[in-house]
């Protein structure tokens, strides 16, 4: 399998090269030259396969022979070793809980897979231009930072630098990405996530910097972070009772890597009725589906902070999946915009009506799905619960009047000392830090 740049100005590369490079030299995102079709036997008898086997069969065509089978199976096993349950909320809506991993967020899957693939790739590389260390540079709007920090902590030959917007991530999220130390370094940016992302992109495009530091990305722009997010859509279908009526799937969407992976899974043969991009007021994709014009805008802070993205990088991959054919895209994807007030009301009502506690992102997904199902009475669906409510305790407790049960792992991390360096949202400050 080769990967081409969405900007079409760089040479195609292997999975290993795409993983190490992160972003193409022409600033495009890597995309597979073709979409492999999953074995029909896997779909028709999915109940009979373990999650490890499902994940291996899904990802193997994208990796090819670049990672030995035994190594890839071990990577996959370590990636999906925690539960990913499909939980009924009411008779028409179920939640796919993606928060049972080590950092209580869906990004554990991609971060764990990528960290192990990168370690395998580096072990097989004989030429890193004489540089023994790779720097993983990542911007986070919340959960990516903690997942990347946990996934790469202690990985030999890798230094991780995480940029996050000061005051715009939750206390738990901040502790997860600032307290490990060692090879994990946190930069607290006095700006927005879009500022952080712009600085990271500028670093990759800076020849002076890249000649002195070997950079790669652990955001979902990296194929090894993005592709494994397909796994849990297959796991959801495995648990779906009515195989003759595939689910509508509502995905809380910010940078659009998660829903893009789901759409890729659908195009590879996974039965899905329809996809919904559940957006907060940072909703340029909702507007695009109405106007066919994609107009980035400055991100606005919301309760669902991981979705506060005004220029989603991964949407270009969705366009590639549909070969830029707007009618086909619109037939398979809808989008709804959910305000903070509606998010609060949904958290409260879902708790009171169904005894289910959603985090702000899950609440956006639930309400978007509910609105779609009101117009399509014959269908049922799934929303992705992407993070544990304990990651947003102040908002959830204020809304519900209940204290969120704190897992032991969170209690332990909240007592650790935060270690971060504060910088302005200016690329020169990031560059200076990296060159020191």
Image: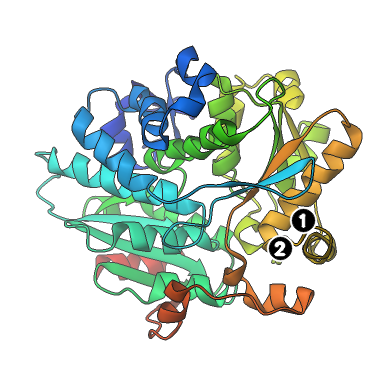
- Residue 309 place in picture, x, y as percent: 63, 54
Residue pictured at 58% horizontal, 71% vertical: 390
Depicted 256 relative to depicted 106: above or below: above
Q: Quadrant of residue 379?
A: top right
| 67 relative to 28 in the view: left or right | left
Q: Quadrant of residue 236?
A: top right
- State the CA–CA distance, disc 2 to disc 1: 7 Å
Question: Does the residue at mark 2 contact the one at mark 1 (Cβ under 8 Å)?
Answer: yes
- Residue 250 place in picture, x, y as percent: 70, 41
Query: Which structural element holds mark 1?
Result: loop
Compare residues 80 and 296 and report the one nearer the observer: 80
| 398 relative to 376 in the view: left or right | left
Q: Which residue is mark 2?
A: 300
| 103 relative to 1 in the view: left or right | right
Q: Quadrant of residue 3?
A: top left
Residue 93 in view here: yes
- In the rendered structure, find residue 281 and report the number of the disc placed on it: 1
- Residue 259 place in picture, x, y as percent: 60, 39
Residue pictured at 81% horizontal, 67% vertical: 348
Lower sequence index among marks 2 and 1: 1
């Amino acid at each position: 399998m080769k990967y081409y740049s969405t900007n079409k100005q760089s040479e195609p590369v292997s999975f290993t090269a795409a993983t190490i490079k992160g972003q193409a030299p022409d600033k495009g995102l890597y995309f597979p030259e073709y979409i492999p079709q999953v074995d029909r036997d896997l779909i028709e008898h999915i109940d009979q396969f373990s999650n490890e086997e499902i994940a291996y069969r899904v990802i193997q065509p994208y990796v090819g022979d670049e990672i030995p089978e035994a190594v890839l199976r071990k990577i996959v096993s370590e990636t999906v070793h925690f539960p990913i349950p499909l939980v009924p909320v009411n008779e028409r809506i179920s939640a796919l809980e993606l928060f049972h991993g080590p950092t209580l967020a869906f990004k554990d899957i991609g971060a764990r897979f990528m960290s192990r693939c990168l370690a395998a790739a580096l072990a097989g590389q004989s030429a890193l231009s004489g540089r023994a260390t790779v720097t993983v540079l990542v911007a986070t709007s919340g959960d990516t930072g903690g997942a990347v920090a946990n996934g790469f902590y202690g990985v030999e030959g890798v230094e991780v630098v995480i940029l996050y917007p000061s005051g715009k991530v939750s206390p738990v999220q901040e502790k997860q990405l600032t307290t490990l130390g060692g090879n994990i370094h946190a930069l607290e940016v006095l700006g927005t996530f879009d500022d952080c992302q712009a600085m990271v992109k500028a670093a990759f495009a800076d020849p002076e910097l890249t000649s002195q530091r070997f950079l790669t990305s652990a955001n979902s722009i990296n194929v090894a972070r993005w592709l494994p997010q397909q796994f849990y859509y297959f796991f959801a279908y495995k648990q779906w009772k009515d195989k003759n009526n595939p689910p509508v799937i509502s995905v809380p969407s910010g940078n659009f890597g998660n829903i893009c992976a789901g759409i890729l899974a659908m195009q590879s043969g996974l039965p899905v009725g329809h996809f919904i991009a559940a957006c907060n007021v940072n909703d340029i994709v909702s507007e695009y589906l109405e106007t066919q014009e994609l107009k980035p805008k400055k991100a606005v802070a919301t309760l669902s902070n991981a979705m506060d993205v005004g220029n989603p990088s991964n949407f270009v991959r969705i366009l590639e999946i549909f070969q830029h054919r707007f009618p086909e895209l619109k037939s398979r994807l809808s989008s709804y915009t959910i305000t903070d007030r509606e998010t609060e009301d949904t958290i409260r009502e879902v708790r009171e009506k169904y005894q289910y506690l959603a985090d702000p992102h899950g609440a956006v997904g639930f309400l978007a799905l509910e609105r779609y199902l009101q117009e399509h009475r014959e269908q049922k669906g799934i929303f992705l619960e992407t993070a544990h409510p304990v990651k947003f305790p102040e908002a959830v407790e204020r809304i519900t009047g209940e204290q969120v049960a704190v897992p032991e792992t969170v209690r332990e991390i909240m007592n650790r000392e935060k270690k971060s360096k504060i910088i302005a949202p200016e690329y020169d400050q990031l560059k200076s830090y990296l060159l020191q």
